[in-house]
Image (cartoon, rainbow, N blue to C red):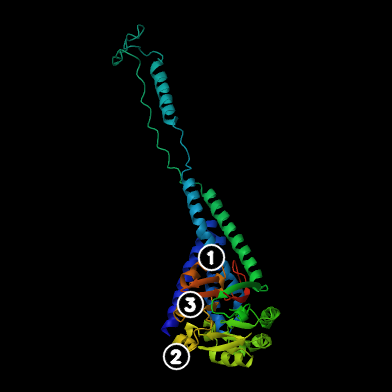
Amino acid sequence: MFGVLGFAGTLALVTGLIHLYLWKRLVRDTTRPGRWRRVGGVAVLVLALLTPATLVGTQQGFYWLAWPGYLWLAVMFYLLVLLAVLEIPMLAARLALRRTRVAVPAAAPAAAESDGAAAGGAEAGAAAPGRPIGGVPPTDAAPDREPALIAATPSGPPPTATPPPVPAAPPAPDHDPGRRLLLARGAAIFAGLTATGVVGYGVRTALGPPQLDRVQIPLAKLPRSMDGLRIATVSDIHIGPLTGRAHTERIVSIINRLDADLVAVVGDLVDGTVGELGPAAAPLHDLRSRYGSFFVTGNHEYYSGVEEWVVELDRLGLRVLQNRREEILARGGALDVAGVNDPTGEGLGNGAGPDFAAALGGRDPSRPVVLLAHQPVNVHEAARHGVDLQLSGHTHGGQIVPFNLLVGLQQPVVSGHATIGGTQIYVTNGAGFWGPPVRVGAPPQVTLVELRSA
């Protein structure tokens, strides 16, 4: 209970902070106080509530929230990334605008002083009618008037009047508010159009057919007679509220055209219960391979009723490898195919987590072993048990660039082939999507792994 509340509280806090930032950059900075700012604020508030409502509501069966909620989640992500990247050039532009002040001409005070001096000089130099000059009374003064008391004028140029002080000009504004508004609107328009365009491209990619990749991996222990053994590998089909039976049929059709020796479905097949998604998963019954189709659980199976799905997939003809292995005898040679449960099952008890000892213990070490493990991080334990090749998914290849950078902090391999601790690992992008129906930089994928004898 406390875990759920803690998750909900963290989700609400993060969502609120992101939308507060978006409101500041997209609404407050781009509008003047008034009706449009209020309308924008209400819109951002509604979108902020839509995000957690979608994540929680789709788990409760409110699937109508999925399209608007997950699409906004993708747009929100790219708006956040783009606006954060624009912060540096926007800061530089704002600093440049602050330096653009209303200039006060430097000669203005001097000119005012000169004008005042000229006016004072003219005033001092002009003799009013009947006024004595140089302190000498006029000779034709009337005899009955007393001579005026006039202070003696010192020798030298005539005095000038002191100009009145020039009032200081009001401080210039840091920048032009109109230019700042234009700058903010330009950034908001650029971020909005770019985010919408990228998400539109990502939707088209995610809902399109998976691309087929082919990779050759040499195994030192593989018998010559088994050279070229082919494993059709698929992960993260994510049958769920935004996909249906047609999604499964398309993937099955792609795999069957490969005419593979083995089929490996490495987890995260479904996002819902057997009752909800059983008909959509039914085409898996048509998977074809020479030596069998195998499945291991991913973390999403444990959110969707794993025990019922194990029974259902067994009915559909997939061999579910729950911490066990099977021997493949082909072309006069032998190969072990093993599988371990996803680590998510550890909290369920009854051995539901991965058990490498059970899956790999007691085997013939001269045989090559291919391990199916949903999460790439299992490769460290696989290397300690001498696994030759691990096939994994889980990462979606990052699904949405630059989210792949964050995935790389948790998983040793995000996509493709690598060698870790002497064990080779191949991570497929997956054929579906989770959350937003968007893939950018990590197209959906079905991989044909061809084993070569070294």
**In the rendered image, is residue 31 in sight?**
no
User: Quarter of the image containing the N terminus?
Assistant: bottom left
- Image quadrant assignment for residue 288: bottom right
Asked where in the image residue 203 lies, by quadrant, the reply is bottom right
**One can see residue 157 in this view:** yes
Q: In this view, does 157 lie to the left or right of 448?
A: left
Give how far apart the Cα atoms at labels 3 and 2 are. 22 Å
| Mark 3 lies on residue | 379
Q: Which of 5 and 107 is in front in this view?
A: 5
Q: Left or right: 94 with respect to 151? A: right
Q: Earlier in the sequence, mark 3 or mark 1?
A: 3
Between residue 238 and residue 354, name the one nearer to us: 354
Q: Mark number for residue 402?
A: 1
Mark pair 2, 1: CA separation = 36 Å
Residue 426 x/y as whole percent: 55, 74
Compare marks 3 and 2 and give the one earlier in the sequence.
2
Q: Which amino acid does label 2 sit on?
A: Gly
Residue annotated with mark 2: 349
Q: Which amino acid does label 1 sit on?
A: Pro
Please name whichever residue, 449 or 206, is drawn nearer the observer in this view of the structure: 449
Q: What element carries label 1?
A: loop
Residue found 48% across the figure and 77% down from its top? 379
Q: In which quarter of the image is the C terminus?
A: bottom right
Q: Type of residue at label 3?
A: Val
How many C-alpha atoms fall within 10 Å of the one at disc 3: few (<14), some, or many (≥20)? Answer: many
The answer to which of marks 2 and 1 sits earlier in the sequence is 2
Give the crowd class for mark 1: few <14, some 14-19, many >=20 residues within 10 Å. Answer: some
121 vs 428, left or right, is left
Tag 3 secondary structure: helix
- Compared to residue 131, the image places residue 66 above or below, namely below
Q: Do the residues labelled 2 and 1 touch (CB within 8 Å)?
A: no
Q: What percent of the width, then of the height, locates residue 126?
A: 41, 16
